[in-house]
Amino acid sequence: MQTVLIADDEENIREGIKLIIDWDELGFEIIGTASNGEEALSSIKKLNPSLVVMDMQMPKIHGIDVIKKARAEGYEGYFIILSGYSDFSYAQDAIRNRVTNYITKPIDEDELYDTVKKIKEEIDRNAKEGRRSGQIRSKAKSVVTSELLLGTYFDKDEEGDVSLTEDRRDELESMGLLSTLYQVIIFETYHTGRQGNSEYEYLNLLPTFLDENSFEALNIKGNDCILLKGKAAVSRFEDFISHYEKYSIESDSPLDNIFIAIGTTVDSPVNIDSSYESAKSIADRRFFCDEGEHFVRADVTSKDAPEETSDNRKAGKTGIAGISEDERGKAVILDKQRIMDKILEAVIAGNRTAMVNATEDLYNYIENNISGNSDACLYATEILLGIKDRLTKQYPMLADVFDTHAGIIEFIEGRFYLYEIMQYMVETMDKVLGKLHEHAASENIIDDIISYTDRNYAQPLTLEDLASRFGYNSGYLGRLFTRTTGTGYNYYLNECRISKAKAFLAEGKYKVYEVAQLVGYNDVDYFSKKFRKHAGMTPAEFRRQNKEAK
Protein backbone atom coordinates (compact mmCIF):
# COMPACT_ATOMS: atom_id res chain seq x y z
CA MET A 1 0.00 0.00 0.00
CA GLN A 2 1.34 3.43 -1.03
CA THR A 3 0.77 6.55 1.10
CA VAL A 4 -0.60 10.02 0.32
CA LEU A 5 -0.43 13.43 2.02
CA ILE A 6 -3.13 16.04 1.24
CA ALA A 7 -2.14 19.70 1.61
CA ASP A 8 -4.56 22.59 1.07
CA ASP A 9 -5.36 25.67 3.13
CA GLU A 10 -9.12 25.06 2.82
CA GLU A 11 -10.51 22.32 5.07
CA ASN A 12 -13.51 21.60 2.84
CA ILE A 13 -11.17 20.93 -0.11
CA ARG A 14 -8.96 18.63 2.02
CA GLU A 15 -11.98 16.66 3.11
CA GLY A 16 -13.34 16.65 -0.43
CA ILE A 17 -10.10 15.22 -1.86
CA LYS A 18 -10.33 12.41 0.70
CA LEU A 19 -13.79 11.45 -0.51
CA ILE A 20 -13.82 12.31 -4.22
CA ILE A 21 -12.10 9.06 -5.24
CA ASP A 22 -11.60 5.60 -3.68
CA TRP A 23 -7.96 5.86 -2.58
CA ASP A 24 -7.92 2.34 -1.20
CA GLU A 25 -9.01 0.90 -4.54
CA LEU A 26 -6.07 2.65 -6.19
CA GLY A 27 -3.65 1.25 -3.61
CA PHE A 28 -3.16 4.37 -1.49
CA GLU A 29 -3.64 5.14 2.18
CA ILE A 30 -4.11 8.74 3.38
CA ILE A 31 -1.60 9.23 6.20
CA GLY A 32 -1.91 12.96 6.86
CA THR A 33 -3.10 16.43 5.92
CA ALA A 34 -1.56 19.90 6.04
CA SER A 35 -3.18 23.34 6.05
CA ASN A 36 -0.12 25.43 5.13
CA GLY A 37 3.31 25.13 3.52
CA GLU A 38 5.21 24.69 6.79
CA GLU A 39 2.96 21.81 7.87
CA ALA A 40 3.26 20.25 4.42
CA LEU A 41 7.07 20.40 4.40
CA SER A 42 7.26 19.06 7.97
CA SER A 43 4.88 16.19 7.16
CA ILE A 44 6.83 15.29 4.01
CA LYS A 45 10.04 15.04 6.07
CA LYS A 46 8.38 13.06 8.84
CA LEU A 47 6.06 10.74 6.89
CA ASN A 48 7.88 10.43 3.52
CA PRO A 49 4.61 9.80 1.63
CA SER A 50 4.61 8.18 -1.80
CA LEU A 51 2.41 11.00 -3.15
CA VAL A 52 1.66 14.58 -2.12
CA VAL A 53 -1.51 16.26 -3.40
CA MET A 54 -0.92 19.96 -2.76
CA ASP A 55 -2.40 23.33 -3.63
CA MET A 56 0.06 25.68 -5.31
CA GLN A 57 -1.04 28.77 -3.32
CA MET A 58 -0.18 27.74 0.26
CA PRO A 59 0.16 30.10 3.27
CA LYS A 60 3.55 30.53 5.04
CA ILE A 61 5.53 28.64 2.39
CA HIS A 62 4.46 28.73 -1.23
CA GLY A 63 3.73 25.36 -2.83
CA ILE A 64 6.62 25.60 -5.32
CA ASP A 65 9.04 26.37 -2.45
CA VAL A 66 7.76 23.38 -0.50
CA ILE A 67 8.61 21.23 -3.52
CA LYS A 68 12.08 22.78 -3.92
CA LYS A 69 12.94 22.33 -0.23
CA ALA A 70 11.60 18.77 -0.16
CA ARG A 71 13.62 17.82 -3.23
CA ALA A 72 16.73 19.47 -1.82
CA GLU A 73 16.42 17.29 1.29
CA GLY A 74 16.13 14.09 -0.72
CA TYR A 75 12.39 13.53 -1.10
CA GLU A 76 11.82 11.26 -4.12
CA GLY A 77 8.02 10.92 -4.08
CA TYR A 78 5.39 12.23 -6.49
CA PHE A 79 3.50 15.56 -6.45
CA ILE A 80 0.07 16.38 -7.83
CA ILE A 81 -0.24 20.16 -7.99
CA LEU A 82 -3.68 21.74 -7.64
CA SER A 83 -3.70 25.11 -9.35
CA GLY A 84 -5.83 27.80 -10.92
CA TYR A 85 -5.25 28.95 -14.48
CA SER A 86 -3.28 31.96 -13.24
CA ASP A 87 -0.72 29.68 -11.53
CA PHE A 88 0.77 28.28 -14.72
CA SER A 89 3.51 30.89 -14.47
CA TYR A 90 5.10 28.52 -11.93
CA ALA A 91 5.10 25.59 -14.34
CA GLN A 92 8.76 26.02 -15.36
CA ASP A 93 9.98 25.86 -11.74
CA ALA A 94 7.74 22.88 -11.09
CA ILE A 95 9.13 21.00 -14.09
CA ARG A 96 12.69 21.61 -12.89
CA ASN A 97 11.67 19.92 -9.64
CA ARG A 98 10.19 16.89 -11.37
CA VAL A 99 6.50 17.81 -11.12
CA THR A 100 4.52 16.66 -14.16
CA ASN A 101 1.06 16.19 -12.64
CA TYR A 102 -1.23 19.24 -12.71
CA ILE A 103 -4.92 19.39 -11.96
CA THR A 104 -6.81 22.65 -12.25
CA LYS A 105 -9.45 23.71 -9.79
CA PRO A 106 -12.24 22.93 -9.42
CA ILE A 107 -11.04 19.35 -9.24
CA ASP A 108 -12.51 16.91 -11.74
CA GLU A 109 -13.12 13.48 -10.20
CA ASP A 110 -12.19 11.51 -13.33
CA GLU A 111 -9.05 13.57 -13.92
CA LEU A 112 -7.83 13.02 -10.36
CA TYR A 113 -8.64 9.30 -10.56
CA ASP A 114 -6.76 8.85 -13.85
CA THR A 115 -3.75 10.85 -12.61
CA VAL A 116 -3.44 8.87 -9.37
CA LYS A 117 -3.89 5.61 -11.27
CA LYS A 118 -1.04 6.49 -13.66
CA ILE A 119 1.21 7.42 -10.72
CA LYS A 120 0.45 4.09 -9.03
CA GLU A 121 1.26 2.19 -12.23
CA GLU A 122 4.55 4.08 -12.54
CA ILE A 123 5.43 3.34 -8.91
CA ASP A 124 4.75 -0.37 -9.44
CA ARG A 125 6.72 -0.40 -12.70
CA ASN A 126 9.70 1.36 -11.13
CA ALA A 127 9.63 -0.98 -8.14
CA LYS A 128 9.68 -4.00 -10.43
CA GLU A 129 12.51 -2.57 -12.50
CA GLY A 130 14.34 -1.59 -9.32
CA ARG A 131 14.15 -5.14 -8.02
CA ARG A 132 15.38 -6.46 -11.34
CA SER A 133 18.15 -3.88 -11.41
CA GLY A 134 19.08 -4.76 -7.83
CA GLN A 135 19.27 -8.43 -8.74
CA ILE A 136 21.48 -7.61 -11.72
CA ARG A 137 23.74 -5.42 -9.56
CA SER A 138 23.92 -8.12 -6.90
CA LYS A 139 24.85 -10.73 -9.50
CA ALA A 140 27.42 -8.39 -11.04
CA LYS A 141 28.89 -7.68 -7.62
CA SER A 142 29.17 -11.39 -6.90
CA VAL A 143 30.95 -11.96 -10.22
CA VAL A 144 33.38 -9.07 -9.61
CA THR A 145 34.11 -10.28 -6.06
CA SER A 146 34.81 -13.75 -7.39
CA GLU A 147 37.14 -12.34 -10.05
CA LEU A 148 38.98 -10.27 -7.41
CA LEU A 149 39.68 -13.40 -5.37
CA LEU A 150 40.74 -15.42 -8.39
CA GLY A 151 42.93 -12.63 -9.77
CA THR A 152 41.06 -12.32 -13.08
CA TYR A 153 39.41 -8.92 -12.56
CA PHE A 154 42.33 -6.66 -13.50
CA ASP A 155 43.89 -6.53 -16.95
CA LYS A 156 47.61 -7.21 -17.16
CA ASP A 157 50.07 -5.04 -19.06
CA GLU A 158 52.73 -6.35 -21.43
CA GLU A 159 54.99 -7.23 -18.51
CA GLY A 160 52.23 -9.14 -16.74
CA ASP A 161 51.68 -6.52 -14.02
CA VAL A 162 48.30 -5.21 -12.89
CA SER A 163 47.32 -1.78 -11.59
CA LEU A 164 44.21 -0.10 -10.22
CA THR A 165 43.00 2.11 -13.07
CA GLU A 166 40.55 4.96 -12.54
CA ASP A 167 37.77 3.05 -14.30
CA ARG A 168 38.28 -0.03 -12.15
CA ARG A 169 38.46 2.11 -9.00
CA ASP A 170 35.14 3.80 -9.86
CA GLU A 171 33.49 0.45 -10.62
CA LEU A 172 34.64 -1.08 -7.32
CA GLU A 173 33.56 2.01 -5.42
CA SER A 174 30.09 1.94 -6.97
CA MET A 175 29.71 -1.68 -5.84
CA GLY A 176 30.93 -1.04 -2.32
CA LEU A 177 34.07 -3.10 -2.92
CA LEU A 178 36.69 -0.36 -2.61
CA SER A 179 38.49 -0.27 0.73
CA THR A 180 41.88 0.38 2.33
CA LEU A 181 42.31 -3.12 3.77
CA TYR A 182 41.14 -6.60 2.78
CA GLN A 183 41.41 -10.12 4.15
CA VAL A 184 40.10 -13.38 2.73
CA ILE A 185 38.76 -16.06 5.04
CA ILE A 186 37.94 -19.62 3.98
CA PHE A 187 35.80 -21.62 6.36
CA GLU A 188 34.55 -25.16 6.39
CA THR A 189 31.67 -26.51 8.43
CA TYR A 190 31.81 -30.23 8.92
CA HIS A 191 29.27 -32.46 10.64
CA THR A 192 30.42 -35.46 12.59
CA GLY A 193 27.39 -35.93 14.78
CA ARG A 194 29.50 -35.34 17.88
CA GLN A 195 27.45 -34.44 20.95
CA GLY A 196 24.34 -34.43 18.79
CA ASN A 197 25.27 -31.16 17.11
CA SER A 198 22.96 -30.09 14.32
CA GLU A 199 24.16 -28.40 11.18
CA TYR A 200 25.83 -25.12 12.04
CA GLU A 201 25.99 -22.26 9.58
CA TYR A 202 28.94 -20.02 10.39
CA LEU A 203 27.60 -17.28 8.11
CA ASN A 204 24.67 -16.78 10.48
CA LEU A 205 27.15 -15.70 13.15
CA LEU A 206 28.92 -13.00 11.14
CA PRO A 207 26.25 -10.26 11.39
CA THR A 208 26.47 -10.44 15.19
CA PHE A 209 29.89 -8.76 15.14
CA LEU A 210 30.34 -7.46 11.57
CA ASP A 211 28.43 -4.75 9.73
CA GLU A 212 26.64 -6.31 6.73
CA ASN A 213 28.42 -3.90 4.37
CA SER A 214 31.87 -4.80 5.70
CA PHE A 215 32.10 -8.28 4.20
CA GLU A 216 31.16 -10.31 1.15
CA ALA A 217 30.32 -14.01 1.33
CA LEU A 218 30.63 -16.29 -1.68
CA ASN A 219 31.57 -19.79 -2.75
CA ILE A 220 34.54 -20.26 -5.08
CA LYS A 221 35.30 -23.69 -6.49
CA GLY A 222 33.74 -25.40 -3.48
CA ASN A 223 35.38 -23.09 -0.93
CA ASP A 224 33.11 -20.99 1.30
CA CYS A 225 34.85 -17.61 1.38
CA ILE A 226 34.48 -14.32 3.23
CA LEU A 227 36.07 -11.12 1.96
CA LEU A 228 36.54 -8.69 4.84
CA LYS A 229 36.58 -5.02 3.78
CA GLY A 230 38.13 -2.32 5.93
CA LYS A 231 40.27 -2.08 9.05
CA ALA A 232 37.27 -2.27 11.36
CA ALA A 233 36.05 -5.56 9.86
CA VAL A 234 39.53 -7.11 9.95
CA SER A 235 40.01 -5.99 13.56
CA ARG A 236 36.62 -7.25 14.72
CA PHE A 237 37.15 -10.61 13.05
CA GLU A 238 40.57 -10.90 14.73
CA ASP A 239 38.97 -10.10 18.10
CA PHE A 240 36.44 -12.87 17.51
CA ILE A 241 39.14 -15.41 16.66
CA SER A 242 41.39 -14.30 19.54
CA HIS A 243 38.58 -14.79 22.03
CA TYR A 244 38.15 -18.42 21.08
CA GLU A 245 41.90 -18.98 20.98
CA LYS A 246 42.14 -17.69 24.54
CA TYR A 247 39.28 -19.84 25.82
CA SER A 248 39.41 -23.26 24.20
CA ILE A 249 36.29 -24.40 22.35
CA GLU A 250 34.43 -27.08 24.27
CA SER A 251 33.51 -30.29 22.48
CA ASP A 252 29.77 -29.60 22.67
CA SER A 253 30.10 -26.14 21.13
CA PRO A 254 28.89 -25.70 17.52
CA LEU A 255 32.20 -23.92 16.86
CA ASP A 256 33.91 -27.26 17.42
CA ASN A 257 32.62 -28.21 13.98
CA ILE A 258 34.29 -25.46 11.97
CA PHE A 259 37.72 -24.85 10.46
CA ILE A 260 38.79 -21.34 9.45
CA ALA A 261 41.75 -20.53 7.20
CA ILE A 262 42.76 -16.89 7.61
CA GLY A 263 44.52 -15.30 4.66
CA THR A 264 46.98 -12.41 4.70
CA THR A 265 45.80 -8.80 4.94
CA VAL A 266 46.33 -6.69 1.81
CA ASP A 267 45.98 -2.94 1.29
CA SER A 268 44.83 -2.90 -2.34
CA PRO A 269 42.14 -4.69 -4.33
CA VAL A 270 44.90 -5.61 -6.78
CA ASN A 271 46.32 -7.98 -4.12
CA ILE A 272 43.09 -9.62 -2.95
CA ASP A 273 43.95 -12.73 -4.96
CA SER A 274 47.14 -13.22 -2.94
CA SER A 275 45.11 -13.14 0.28
CA TYR A 276 42.79 -15.75 -1.22
CA GLU A 277 45.70 -17.95 -2.30
CA SER A 278 47.27 -17.80 1.17
CA ALA A 279 43.95 -18.81 2.76
CA LYS A 280 43.41 -21.56 0.18
CA SER A 281 46.87 -23.05 0.78
CA ILE A 282 45.93 -23.37 4.46
CA ALA A 283 42.48 -24.78 3.68
CA ASP A 284 44.03 -27.36 1.37
CA ARG A 285 46.16 -28.59 4.30
CA ARG A 286 43.28 -28.59 6.80
CA PHE A 287 43.37 -32.38 6.86
CA PHE A 288 46.80 -32.26 8.53
CA CYS A 289 45.90 -29.90 11.38
CA ASP A 290 46.28 -30.90 15.01
CA GLU A 291 43.39 -31.84 17.25
CA GLY A 292 41.46 -28.79 18.39
CA GLU A 293 43.11 -26.57 15.78
CA HIS A 294 40.18 -24.61 14.36
CA PHE A 295 41.86 -21.36 13.28
CA VAL A 296 45.01 -21.20 11.16
CA ARG A 297 46.58 -17.96 9.94
CA ALA A 298 48.79 -17.31 6.96
CA ASP A 299 52.20 -16.34 8.33
CA VAL A 300 53.41 -14.16 5.47
CA THR A 301 52.35 -10.74 4.17
CA SER A 302 51.01 -10.50 0.65
CA LYS A 303 53.79 -8.37 -0.82
CA ASP A 304 56.62 -10.36 0.72
CA ALA A 305 55.21 -13.81 0.07
CA PRO A 306 57.52 -15.90 -2.12
CA GLU A 307 56.15 -17.08 -5.41
CA GLU A 308 55.31 -20.74 -5.00
CA THR A 309 54.94 -23.01 -7.98
CA SER A 310 53.35 -26.43 -7.97
CA ASP A 311 56.78 -28.00 -8.42
CA ASN A 312 58.55 -26.38 -5.48
CA ARG A 313 55.42 -26.78 -3.37
CA LYS A 314 55.44 -30.50 -4.06
CA ALA A 315 59.17 -30.73 -3.53
CA GLY A 316 58.88 -29.01 -0.17
CA LYS A 317 56.24 -31.47 1.01
CA THR A 318 57.79 -34.67 -0.22
CA GLY A 319 61.38 -33.99 0.67
CA ILE A 320 62.40 -36.31 -2.18
CA ALA A 321 62.41 -33.87 -5.10
CA GLY A 322 65.07 -34.31 -7.74
CA ILE A 323 64.64 -38.04 -8.16
CA SER A 324 62.71 -39.88 -10.86
CA GLU A 325 59.08 -40.95 -10.46
CA ASP A 326 60.15 -44.61 -10.33
CA GLU A 327 62.69 -43.92 -7.58
CA ARG A 328 60.16 -41.86 -5.65
CA GLY A 329 57.60 -44.67 -5.88
CA LYS A 330 60.12 -47.23 -4.63
CA ALA A 331 61.07 -44.96 -1.71
CA VAL A 332 57.42 -44.60 -0.67
CA ILE A 333 56.90 -48.38 -0.76
CA LEU A 334 60.02 -48.99 1.34
CA ASP A 335 58.94 -46.37 3.89
CA LYS A 336 55.49 -47.91 4.07
CA GLN A 337 56.92 -51.35 4.73
CA ARG A 338 59.31 -49.97 7.35
CA ILE A 339 56.56 -48.19 9.29
CA MET A 340 54.23 -51.19 9.06
CA ASP A 341 56.96 -53.50 10.40
CA LYS A 342 57.62 -51.18 13.35
CA ILE A 343 53.94 -51.19 14.36
CA LEU A 344 53.70 -54.97 13.96
CA GLU A 345 56.85 -55.60 15.99
CA ALA A 346 55.57 -53.40 18.83
CA VAL A 347 52.14 -55.06 18.89
CA ILE A 348 53.51 -58.60 18.80
CA ALA A 349 56.02 -57.72 21.53
CA GLY A 350 53.24 -56.21 23.66
CA ASN A 351 55.08 -52.88 23.78
CA ARG A 352 52.36 -50.24 23.74
CA THR A 353 54.74 -47.29 23.98
CA ALA A 354 56.65 -48.51 20.92
CA MET A 355 53.34 -48.99 19.09
CA VAL A 356 52.24 -45.40 19.86
CA ASN A 357 55.65 -44.07 18.80
CA ALA A 358 55.50 -46.00 15.52
CA THR A 359 52.03 -44.61 14.85
CA GLU A 360 53.34 -41.10 15.48
CA ASP A 361 56.11 -41.82 12.97
CA LEU A 362 53.41 -42.76 10.48
CA TYR A 363 51.56 -39.51 11.19
CA ASN A 364 54.71 -37.44 10.67
CA TYR A 365 55.60 -39.28 7.49
CA ILE A 366 52.17 -38.71 5.95
CA GLU A 367 52.13 -35.06 7.02
CA ASN A 368 55.54 -34.34 5.51
CA ASN A 369 55.45 -36.51 2.41
CA ILE A 370 51.86 -36.91 1.20
CA SER A 371 50.43 -33.85 -0.51
CA GLY A 372 46.70 -34.55 -0.80
CA ASN A 373 43.92 -35.65 1.55
CA SER A 374 42.88 -38.55 -0.67
CA ASP A 375 46.46 -39.80 -1.01
CA ALA A 376 46.91 -39.55 2.77
CA CYS A 377 43.74 -41.58 3.40
CA LEU A 378 44.81 -44.17 0.84
CA TYR A 379 48.27 -44.48 2.42
CA ALA A 380 46.84 -44.94 5.94
CA THR A 381 44.27 -47.43 4.63
CA GLU A 382 46.95 -49.55 2.98
CA ILE A 383 49.01 -49.54 6.20
CA LEU A 384 46.10 -50.64 8.41
CA LEU A 385 44.80 -53.26 5.97
CA GLY A 386 48.35 -54.62 5.62
CA ILE A 387 48.68 -54.89 9.41
CA LYS A 388 45.28 -56.56 9.63
CA ASP A 389 46.16 -59.17 7.00
CA ARG A 390 49.50 -59.99 8.61
CA LEU A 391 48.12 -60.28 12.16
CA THR A 392 44.94 -62.22 11.34
CA LYS A 393 46.93 -64.77 9.32
CA GLN A 394 49.37 -65.26 12.20
CA TYR A 395 46.73 -64.96 14.96
CA PRO A 396 43.29 -65.99 13.61
CA MET A 397 41.58 -65.10 16.91
CA LEU A 398 42.22 -61.42 16.14
CA ALA A 399 39.84 -61.46 13.16
CA ASP A 400 36.89 -60.18 15.21
CA VAL A 401 38.98 -57.32 16.68
CA PHE A 402 39.31 -55.53 13.34
CA ASP A 403 36.54 -53.88 11.35
CA THR A 404 35.82 -55.37 7.95
CA HIS A 405 37.91 -54.15 5.03
CA ALA A 406 34.93 -52.12 3.83
CA GLY A 407 34.38 -50.70 7.34
CA ILE A 408 38.03 -49.62 7.62
CA ILE A 409 37.98 -47.96 4.20
CA GLU A 410 34.69 -46.20 4.88
CA PHE A 411 35.84 -44.90 8.27
CA ILE A 412 39.18 -43.57 7.04
CA GLU A 413 37.74 -41.93 3.94
CA GLY A 414 35.09 -40.21 6.06
CA ARG A 415 37.56 -38.46 8.39
CA PHE A 416 38.13 -34.72 8.30
CA TYR A 417 41.51 -34.84 10.01
CA LEU A 418 44.53 -37.12 9.87
CA TYR A 419 44.75 -37.25 13.66
CA GLU A 420 41.31 -38.92 13.73
CA ILE A 421 42.67 -41.71 11.55
CA MET A 422 45.68 -42.10 13.83
CA GLN A 423 43.40 -42.25 16.89
CA TYR A 424 41.36 -44.95 15.18
CA MET A 425 44.53 -46.87 14.39
CA VAL A 426 45.84 -46.64 17.97
CA GLU A 427 42.46 -47.72 19.38
CA THR A 428 42.42 -50.70 17.03
CA MET A 429 45.97 -51.64 18.02
CA ASP A 430 45.00 -51.30 21.70
CA LYS A 431 42.23 -53.84 21.12
CA VAL A 432 44.75 -56.11 19.45
CA LEU A 433 47.15 -55.73 22.36
CA GLY A 434 44.37 -56.49 24.81
CA LYS A 435 43.31 -59.59 22.92
CA LEU A 436 46.83 -60.78 22.19
CA HIS A 437 48.36 -60.16 25.62
CA GLU A 438 45.29 -59.96 27.83
CA HIS A 439 46.35 -56.41 28.43
CA ALA A 440 43.89 -54.95 30.96
CA ALA A 441 46.01 -52.18 32.36
CA SER A 442 44.10 -49.57 30.40
CA GLU A 443 41.12 -49.83 32.77
CA ASN A 444 43.35 -49.15 35.76
CA ILE A 445 44.86 -46.07 34.16
CA ILE A 446 41.72 -44.05 34.93
CA ASP A 447 42.33 -44.43 38.66
CA ASP A 448 45.86 -43.14 38.13
CA ILE A 449 44.59 -40.15 36.14
CA ILE A 450 41.99 -39.27 38.77
CA SER A 451 44.62 -39.49 41.50
CA TYR A 452 47.02 -37.35 39.49
CA THR A 453 44.29 -34.76 38.81
CA ASP A 454 43.30 -34.56 42.47
CA ARG A 455 46.92 -33.77 43.36
CA ASN A 456 47.70 -31.39 40.48
CA TYR A 457 44.37 -29.66 39.85
CA ALA A 458 46.02 -26.20 40.00
CA GLN A 459 48.25 -27.00 37.04
CA PRO A 460 47.19 -26.34 33.41
CA LEU A 461 46.06 -29.93 32.87
CA THR A 462 44.83 -31.13 29.48
CA LEU A 463 43.84 -34.55 28.25
CA GLU A 464 46.61 -34.33 25.66
CA ASP A 465 49.26 -33.80 28.36
CA LEU A 466 47.92 -36.67 30.45
CA ALA A 467 47.80 -38.95 27.42
CA SER A 468 51.44 -38.18 26.71
CA ARG A 469 52.40 -38.69 30.35
CA PHE A 470 50.66 -42.06 30.61
CA GLY A 471 51.46 -43.29 27.10
CA TYR A 472 47.97 -43.19 25.58
CA ASN A 473 46.28 -41.60 22.61
CA SER A 474 44.32 -38.56 23.81
CA GLY A 475 41.14 -39.39 21.87
CA TYR A 476 41.11 -42.96 23.10
CA LEU A 477 41.92 -41.90 26.67
CA GLY A 478 39.10 -39.35 26.65
CA ARG A 479 36.55 -41.94 25.57
CA LEU A 480 37.90 -44.46 28.06
CA PHE A 481 37.62 -41.86 30.85
CA THR A 482 34.01 -41.07 29.90
CA ARG A 483 33.08 -44.74 29.63
CA THR A 484 34.65 -45.54 33.01
CA THR A 485 33.52 -42.51 35.05
CA GLY A 486 30.36 -41.48 33.23
CA THR A 487 31.65 -37.95 32.64
CA GLY A 488 34.19 -36.20 30.42
CA TYR A 489 37.65 -35.37 31.72
CA ASN A 490 37.26 -31.59 31.38
CA TYR A 491 34.03 -31.74 33.35
CA TYR A 492 35.71 -33.82 36.05
CA LEU A 493 38.66 -31.39 36.20
CA ASN A 494 36.31 -28.42 36.61
CA GLU A 495 34.32 -30.27 39.28
CA CYS A 496 37.56 -31.01 41.12
CA ARG A 497 38.70 -27.38 40.92
CA ILE A 498 35.32 -25.98 41.99
CA SER A 499 35.24 -28.40 44.92
CA LYS A 500 38.67 -27.16 46.04
CA ALA A 501 37.54 -23.56 45.42
CA LYS A 502 34.56 -24.04 47.74
CA ALA A 503 36.91 -25.16 50.49
CA PHE A 504 39.13 -22.09 50.03
CA LEU A 505 36.13 -19.74 49.91
CA ALA A 506 34.65 -21.29 53.03
CA GLU A 507 37.88 -20.49 54.92
CA GLY A 508 37.28 -16.81 54.21
CA LYS A 509 40.99 -15.99 54.00
CA TYR A 510 41.24 -15.48 50.23
CA LYS A 511 39.75 -13.05 47.75
CA VAL A 512 37.88 -14.46 44.77
CA TYR A 513 40.69 -13.79 42.27
CA GLU A 514 43.18 -15.45 44.67
CA VAL A 515 41.00 -18.54 44.90
CA ALA A 516 40.75 -18.63 41.10
CA GLN A 517 44.54 -18.74 40.83
CA LEU A 518 44.87 -21.32 43.61
CA VAL A 519 42.66 -23.78 41.76
CA GLY A 520 44.14 -23.25 38.30
CA TYR A 521 42.10 -20.44 36.67
CA ASN A 522 44.09 -17.44 35.46
CA ASP A 523 41.00 -15.54 34.34
CA VAL A 524 38.71 -14.64 37.26
CA ASP A 525 35.71 -14.03 34.95
CA TYR A 526 36.10 -17.48 33.43
CA PHE A 527 36.44 -18.94 36.94
CA SER A 528 33.24 -17.18 38.05
CA LYS A 529 31.40 -18.49 35.00
CA LYS A 530 32.52 -22.09 35.67
CA PHE A 531 31.80 -21.77 39.41
CA ARG A 532 28.27 -20.56 38.75
CA LYS A 533 27.69 -23.36 36.24
CA HIS A 534 28.83 -26.05 38.70
CA ALA A 535 27.70 -24.52 42.02
CA GLY A 536 24.59 -22.62 40.98
CA MET A 537 25.86 -19.33 42.39
CA THR A 538 28.80 -16.95 42.06
CA PRO A 539 31.93 -17.37 44.22
CA ALA A 540 31.07 -14.16 46.11
CA GLU A 541 27.55 -15.43 46.85
CA PHE A 542 28.95 -18.77 48.04
CA ARG A 543 31.43 -17.08 50.36
CA ARG A 544 28.76 -14.74 51.74
CA GLN A 545 26.37 -17.65 52.29
CA ASN A 546 29.00 -19.58 54.23
CA LYS A 547 29.92 -16.51 56.26
CA GLU A 548 26.28 -15.96 57.24
CA ALA A 549 25.92 -19.64 58.17
CA LYS A 550 28.73 -19.27 60.69
Image (cartoon, helix red, strand yellow):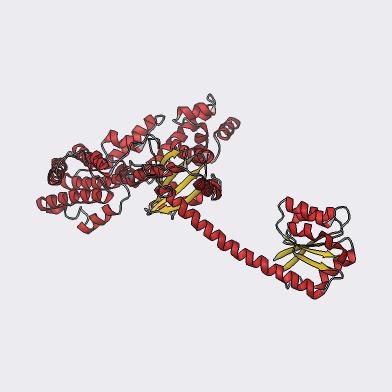
Q: Quadrant of the C terminus?
A: top right
Q: Quadrant of residue 490?
A: top left
Relative to 455, 371 lies left or right? left
Depth check, front residue: 501 or 549: 501
Residue 488 placement (x, y as % from top left): 38, 43
Relative to 363, 190 lies left or right? right
Residue 310 placement (x, y as % from top left): 27, 44
Would residue 405 be visible to someone looking at this image? yes
In the displayed structure, 513 sits above or below 114; it is above
Q: Quadrant of the N terminus?
A: bottom right
Residue 393 placement (x, y as % from top left): 10, 53
In the displayed structure, 540 sits above or below 32; it is above
Relative to 547, 517 lies left or right? left
Q: Quadrant of residue 97?
A: bottom right
In the displayed structure, 49 sits above or below 176; it is below
Would residue 294 be visible to someone looking at this image? no
User: Who's the residue at 49% across and 49% down the image?
Assistant: 216
Depth check, front residue: 141 or 532: 141
In the displayed structure, 370 sits above or below 138; it is above
Q: How many marks?
A: 0
* Residue positioned most to the left: 394
Depth check, front residue: 503 or 174: 174
